[in-house]
């Protein structure tokens, strides 16, 4: 089974570690660049995107993560992780200083549903992942407000808001699969990691 | 689609884990906190050390200030309401803050009862000194717990005690044979269903942060190593010599709490910490942690 790093700077990282271990993958917590040695994929968890973004820069993780992504290694961001992967954040919801990894050709709108009072649970259809609806939790969640030409939409809400996307080896979800007992997305990601390891890196 | 479920309430606290929630009294401090990497800010009228010094009744912040703080930052904004003051909580819910702290740091509004938190759409965090108190608050609907410590002292000793009491209590319940759980629930003054749940899972059903006395990066790392999932810092930041530098150092220490070499680096040259208070020098009636039950 592949060795998957979970960025453990701040946020709900331990939940991802638990879900990965439950399905037999090896999970390691990433705090400093040297922790990335031998890691085949990375999950950027939910948390506070401005906090995690600052810590990424303070600990010089930006370069090694960017390198992983361009080497074709899978990187998956959930909620704050989705924001960090985006090339841009909708101006109205952007923090004064909003560090971004700018790896996926998407624009993200932060806190797109309103305040905490608008956080919600819903069962969502995501045919690309599973034939059956999946339980999801959205907490002060973002949405994808623009997708580039290479971005595939994996899931939308009933009103069409985009909440799950993929661009080759990069995946982003606005919700938190790590908070439900459902492991389908984690299994799907592990399969992506296994199949990416077999293929050569995409030509730039 | 279902809003304001226990999962969404407790889930926001999960997103704050490994982070630092900083007390702020105005928008300017909130910006400094966000810039230093705070995962949320806590709006209150005065920081605990000023409440301790000046006395008088400490209440919910002026809603005008809370709105200004909300407008100044994009990170979650929490605000304190007095123990039992359910109307302050209603007002905070109407303002659309992200979390209400029913806090012993403010002057209690009710000496007998806490707020019926389950009835609210907004999530609550509450203080606790031991497992029984934590479970009573969760029973009332709290979606996050913080060990109380002794706010405004810059002295970590009570925070350590309360954290140890909460976590020690959990270990005891976990190790008990099942037939002892009901009498344990009676002795703790805690709901039986929650005692049973802890016996099975070995942990509280909500996130536990540490509060009350954190003044240095080492203090933050200490409570993290003792099992806190994140920290609240009140007077420790804005009553120190260089708040921005200290705030960033405490954020870093909360992430790298298990890395002494990194902690040594982080802790260097931060200027003077807040002046601390010896707990034994505080009159018993002045102890904030004793408020609430």
Image (cartoon, rainbow, N blue to C red):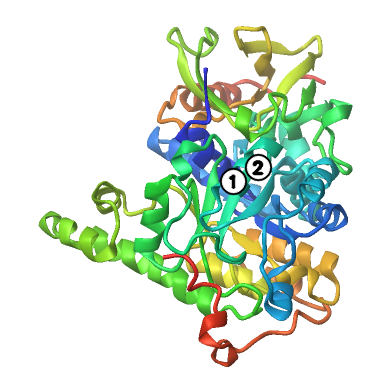
- Disc 2 residue crowd, few under 14, some 14–19, many 20+, Cα 10 Å: some
Observer able to see residue A202: no
- Residue at the disc numbered 2: B91
The x and y percentages for residue B258 are 57, 66
Compared to A19, does B87 lie above or below? below
The residue drawn where x is 44% and y is 7% is A131
The quadrant in which the C terminus of chain B is found is bottom left
Labels 1 and 2 in the same subunit: yes
- Position of residue A90 in the picture relative to residue A30 (left or right): right
Task: Tell me the chain of label 2.
Answer: B
The residue drawn where x is 81% and y is 13% is A148
The x and y percentages for residue B150 are 57, 75
The residue drawn where x is 69% and y is 50% is B39
- Position of residue A14 in the picture relative to residue B98 (left or right): left
Label 2 secondary element: helix
Question: Which residue is more in the foreground, B209 or A19?
Answer: B209
């Amino acid at each position: 089974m592949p060795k998957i790093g979970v960025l453990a700077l701040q946020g709900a990282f331990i939940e991802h570690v638990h879900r990965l271990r439950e399905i037999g993958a090896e999970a390691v917590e990433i705090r400093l660049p040297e922790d990335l040695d031998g890691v085949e994929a990375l999950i950027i968890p939910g948390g506070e995107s401005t906090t995690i973004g600052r810590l990424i820069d303070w600990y010089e993780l930006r370069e090694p993560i960017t390198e992983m992504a361009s080497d074709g290694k899978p990187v998956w961001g959930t909620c704050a992780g989705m924001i960090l992967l985006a090339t841009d954040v909708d101006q109205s919801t952007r923090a004064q200083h909003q560090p971004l990894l700018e790896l996926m050709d998407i624009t993200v709108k932060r806190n797109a549903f309103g305040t905490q009072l608008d956080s919600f649970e819903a069962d969502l259809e995501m045919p690309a992942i599973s034939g059956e609806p999946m339980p999801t939790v959205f907490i002060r969640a973002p949405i994808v407000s623009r997708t580039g030409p290479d971005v595939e939409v994996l899931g939308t809400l009933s009103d069409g808001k985009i909440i799950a996307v993929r661009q080759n080896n990069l995946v982003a979800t606005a919700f938190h699969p790590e908070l439900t007992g459902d492991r389908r997305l984690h299994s799907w990601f592990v399969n992506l990691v296994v199949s990416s390891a077999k293929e050569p890196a995409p030509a730039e | 689609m279902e809003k304001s479920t226990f999962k969404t309430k407790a889930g926001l606290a999960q997103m704050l884990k490994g982070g630092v929630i900083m007390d702020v009294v105005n928008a300017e401090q909130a910006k400094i906190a966000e810039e230093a990497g705070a995962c949320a800010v806590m709006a209150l009228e005065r920081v605990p050390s000023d409440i301790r010094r000046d006395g008088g009744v400490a209440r919910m912040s002026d809603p005008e200030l809370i709105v200004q703080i909300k407008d100044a930052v994009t990170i979650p904004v929490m605000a304190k309401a007095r123990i039992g003051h359910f109307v302050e909580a209603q007002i905070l819910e109407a303002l659309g803050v992200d979390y209400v702290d029913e806090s012993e740091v403010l002057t209690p509004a009710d000496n007998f009862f806490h707020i019926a938190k389950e009835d609210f759409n907004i999530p609550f965090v509450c203080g606790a000194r031991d497992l029984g108190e934590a479970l009573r608050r969760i029973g009332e609907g709290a979606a996050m717990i913080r060990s109380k410590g002794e706010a405004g002292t810059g002295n970590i000793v009570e925070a350590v005690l309360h954290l140890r009491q909460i976590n020690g209590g959990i270990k005891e319940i976990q190790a008990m044979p099942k037939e002892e759980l009901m009498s344990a629930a009676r002795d703790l003054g805690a709901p039986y269903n929650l005692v049973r749940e802890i016996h099975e899972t070995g942990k509280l059903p909500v996130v536990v942060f540490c509060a009350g006395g954190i003044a240095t990066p080492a203090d933050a790392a200490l409570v993290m190593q003792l099992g806190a999932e994140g920290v609240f810092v009140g007077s420790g930041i804005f009553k120190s010599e260089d708040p921005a530098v200290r705030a960033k150092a405490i954020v870093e220490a909360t992430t790298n709490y298990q890395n002494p070499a990194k902690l040594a680096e982080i802790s260097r040259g931060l200027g003077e910490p807040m002046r601390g208070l010896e707990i034994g020098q505080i009159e018993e009636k002045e102890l904030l942690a004793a408020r609430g039950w």
